[in-house]
Image: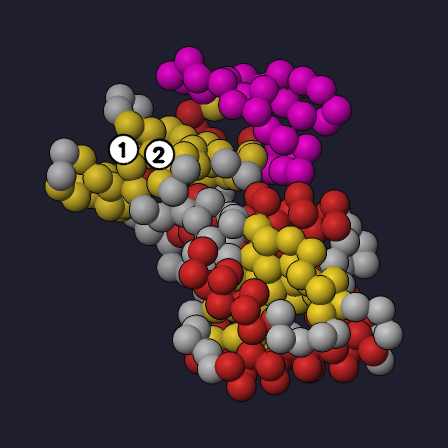
Amino acid sequence: MPLIETLIVDDESLARDSVRVLLQKEPDFKIVGEARNGEEAVKLIEKLTPKLVLLDIQMPQMTGFEVLQHLQLRPLPYFIFITAFDQFALKAFEVNALDYLLKPYSDERFYQSIHKAKTAILKDEWAKLQINLQQMIQGQSAPPTQLIERLAVKQGGKIKLITVSNIAYIKASGTYTEVFEISQKHLTNYSIGELAQKLDPTKFIRIHRSTIVNVEQITELEPYYNGEYIIYMKDGSQHKLSRSYKDQLDKII
C-alpha cells in the first residue's frame, strides 16, 4: 500500500506540532507539508494533491470552510476537520459523514479519526466523500450566524462600536482585519471570513479573499483582466474583484 500523503493545516504552531508528532507514529502516513493559514492551505493542496488534509476550521483571514470554497482541485482530498464548534455545529459534520476532532482531543481520538480516514481511502470511497464535501462547500453544514448592525473595533486602547452602515470596505491585514469607515480606519480581531458571515450579504459583498466592500459605496466598475474587475469607491480607493468572486457582480449591477 502506498503511503497516505497528508497535509496539516492550523494557524497555531503548537497545534501543528502536536498533530505532526502523533501522525509520525503511524507508518502508513507521510506528512508532505504544513500550512499556517487558509491561503497557504489552498496553494499547498493544489500543488501537492494530498490524499488527506487535517484542517483547522477557525483560522484568521480564511476559515476552513473558505478553504473548501477556494479549491479548484478535483477530486478533493479526504478531510478531517479540527474544530472548537459546539454540539449543534458538530451534528452537521456527522450528517455529512465527515470526521472531526474537537479541541482538545485525546491521542486515542486522534488515532481513531485517522484510522477511519485510512479505511475510507483503502475502500476508495471517493465518490461518497465528494458529495459530502460539496454539501459542506455549499454551506449546508455551517452554523447560522446572526447579522450585526454594530461592530466592535479598537481605537486608542478602547473598544469603539461603529454602525455597520458607515463601513465603506474591509481589508484583511496580517492577524487583524482593517475596517474603513468613510472617514477613518479601525482594527478588529474578527477574521474577514467571520465578518463576511456577520454582515448583510445584500449590502456587503466579498470581492476578494482579503476584501469586502459596501455596495452603496461603489461608483464604477472597470473590466480588468481574465474575468477580473477594478471597483472604484466613493472615497477614491480602488479594489480588485477577483475571478473567484465574479458571481458577486449580480449584487452590484
Quick one: quadrant of the N terminus? bottom right
Q: Using residue 154 as the reference point, say whether residue 76 is left or right of it.
A: right
Q: Determine the residue positioned at 68% across, 33% down.
A: 243
Please give the label number shown on residue 186.
Answer: 1
- Residue 11, visible in the rendered structure: yes
- Which residue is disc 2 drawn over? 178
Residue 253 image offset from top left, x and y in percent: 59, 29
Number of other residues with Cα within 10 Å of mark 2, as a class: few under 14, some 14 to 19, many 20 or more: many
Q: Determine the residue positioned at 56% across, 73% down.
A: 22
Q: CA distance from mark 2 to mark 1?
A: 6 Å
Closer to the camera in the image, 30 or 121: 30
Q: Which residues are magenta?
A: 220-249
Mark 2 touches mark 1? (CB < 8 Å):
yes
The amino acid at mark 2 is Glu
Closer to the camera in the image, 190 or 22: 22
Q: Determine the residue positioned at 30% across, 42% down.
A: 188
Residue 54 image offset from top left, x and y in percent: 60, 65
